[in-house]
Amino acid sequence: MGRKPMVRPGGRSARVQASVHAAVRELESEVGREGLTVPLVAARAGVTPSTIYRRWGDLQELLSDVAIERLRPETAPEEKGDLRSDLEAWAEQFLEEMASPTGRAYIRDALLGDPDGSNAGQCSAYAAEQIDVILTRAADRGESAPDVEMVLDRVVGPVMYRILFRPDGLDAAYAHQLVTGLLGSTDG
Amino acid sequence: MGRKPMVRPGGRSARVQASVHAAVRELESEVGREGLTVPLVAARAGVTPSTIYRRWGDLQELLSDVAIERLRPETAPEEKGDLRSDLEAWAEQFLEEMASPTGRAYIRDALLGDPDGSNAGQCSAYAAEQIDVILTRAADRGESAPDVEMVLDRVVGPVMYRILFRPDGLDAAYAHQLVTGLLGSTDG
DNA sequence: ACCTTAAAGCAAATTTGTTGCTTCAAGCGC
DNA sequence: GCGCTTGAAGCAACAAATTTGCTTTAAGGT
């Protein structure tokens, strides 16, 4: 969960947080990521700038909190029937979402305004959760499956590395290839 | 190469760039990463702030350029005699450097002030170069070796992912394990 | 040596970020 | 329910950073 926003969960604080987050999302689509400023967000949220400065520190930390919200998976991974299919489907969707322009922007924002690494950790935890669901299903079916750390190393790590450091040439085939490399190429 | 600095390589521009970069490095160790501001750097470099704003845009882009310089490997990978040893030694050193507090800071800076991803690309290119040297040596010895992309996926990607997204529990053993996973565990 | 032209300097104007103090309202004891 | 306690929000003055138009400097070419 976000850092500062969680104090005094109900009441005014919660309303302020909600309206500030909403203002960020609205303005992001109106003036673009570049046009955002703290005073602008504050005005839209009906709040004084010092409220934002005191609660979030600066624009980057605020954007980091918002980005984390938007990176949270909304649904459980699709169930295809076997480990390989589940993982492939998930990896392809993960890559597609993360490598899209908006996905990249959120990843950047999440990393940037994150002095203590907790938002980045959260981001990784989301992926780990999804993977865990897939692996647990496989185990329940009696399939042998790698552990979560292995999937992070062999699929998530390479994908995120390339998204961040090598903008080009990422597609579903790459995700597919990573999963194949992990599970072995013996086809069913 | 850096973005804007390369125009008019000789003369005043070059001197300004050099003194600004030097000022950043000096001040980083004097007031710390947090205490840096554009006006402060400008004063130390003997330059007006507007020069920095016009050439680099903002502090983050300047820090990104400086970070890239510091992430450039200074020496060729150590030669141990066989592929496995060369890769293990390189991976351990790479992890150690990148996972250190200063390494993490440089990676962050390099990524953050990098609108078009060229600095991040440079950073990846440095690793690819080093790996290529190691793999070429192995090929010259007649050893069979994976290709550079494979090493990026199996070693560099996971390491960078964990540095950025999962601050904890990174050590030489992890690097070793990644190389072993890549080359197979048959011991010589 | 003289043009041409990026880039640097300078200074005013604007915008953003900080801070002390006051006011508000959520949560708690009665 | 009623009134404390306290963290958070509002306000306003202040400080600092950023932007901008114009002038000046000096590289690089003729």
Image (spheres, coloured by chain):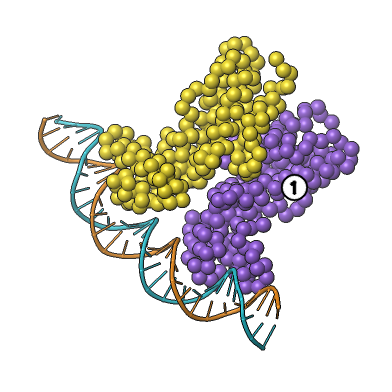
Chain colours: A yellow, B purple, C cyan, D orange
Pointer 1 local density, CA inside 10 Å: few below 14, some 14–19, many at least 20: some
x, y (%) of residue B147?
Answer: 77, 37
- Compared across the picture, whether A115 is left or right of A155 comes to left
Q: Is residue B4 visible?
A: yes
Question: In which quadrant of the rendered view does residue B169 lie?
Answer: top right
Quarter of the image for the C terminus of chain B: give it.
top right
Query: Which residue corresponds to mark 1?
Result: B129
Give the SS element for disc 1: helix
Q: Residue at x 62, y 63 (%)?
A: B5
x, y (%) of residue B92?
Answer: 71, 41
From the viewer's side, name the closer residue of D15 and A166: A166
x, y (%) of residue C26?
Answer: 25, 35
From the viewer's side, name the closer residue of A26 and B56: A26
- Compared across the picture, whether D27 is left or right of A131 comes to right
Q: Is residue A107 visible?
A: no
Question: In which quadrant of the rendered view does residue B45 lie?
Answer: bottom right
Which chain does the residue under circle 1 lie in?
B
From the viewer's side, name the closer residue of B174 and A113: A113
Q: Residue at x 64, y 65 (%)?
A: B7
> What amino acid type should be assigned to the residue bearing mark 1?
Glu
